[in-house]
Image (cartoon, rainbow, N blue to C red):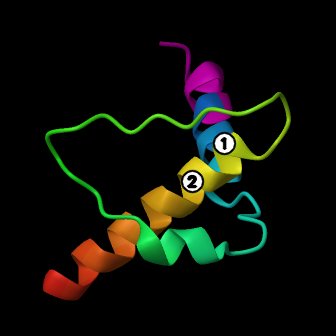
Amino acid sequence: MDKNLKKLLSDISLEEANDDLGVERDLLKNIRLNKSLILTVQGVRRSGKSIFIKQIINLFFDIVKKFF
């Protein structure tokens, strides 16, 4: 892979990792993740589904960090 392309993709990944996660929702406190199930989030366009999923991922990683 071209070095410039690798750098570009790396920069994009870093930007996405630092995205604003919006306002924390109270609903996050009630989510119980089950590793044998697939989580789906449905909603109208531009209603914050992606941000909500990122918040869930961050919550999951925060929980995992506590155990290690």
Is 24 inside the magenta-drawn segment?
Answer: no
Q: Classify mark 1: helix, strand or loop.
A: helix
Q: 67 or 16, which lies in front?
A: 67
Q: 42 or 65, which lies in front?
A: 42
Q: Residue at x 61, y 30 (%)?
A: 9
Residue furthest to the right in view is 46
Which residue is the site of mark 2?
54
Query: In the drawing, does residue 1 fall left or right of residue 51?
Result: left
Name the magenta segment's main secondary structure.
helix
Which residue is the site of mark 1?
50
Assess disc 2: are there few (<14), some (14-19) or many (≥20) residues with their C-alpha within 10 Å of its C-alpha.
some
Q: 60 or 44, which lies in front?
A: 44
Q: Quadrant of residue 59?
A: bottom left
Q: Amino acid at mark 2?
A: Lys
Residue 21: percent from left, percent from top: 71, 64
Q: Amino acid at mark 1?
A: Ser
Q: Residue at x 77, y 63 (%)?
A: 20
Q: Is residue 4 above or below residue 7?
A: above
Residue 10: percent from left, percent from top: 58, 39
Q: Residue at x 38, y 39 (%)?
A: 39
Quarter of the image containing the C terminus?
A: bottom left
Kindly indicate whether the residue at mark 2 contacts the one at mark 1 (C-beta within 8 angstroms).
Answer: yes
Q: Which stretch did the figure color magenta?
A: 1-8
Q: Is residue 58 above or below residue 6?
A: below
Q: CA distance from mark 1 to mark 2?
A: 6 Å
Q: Classify mark 2: helix, strand or loop.
A: helix
Residue 63: percent from left, percent from top: 30, 77
Please tell me how many numbered marks the rendered image carries: 2
Q: Residue at x 68, y 51 (%)?
A: 51
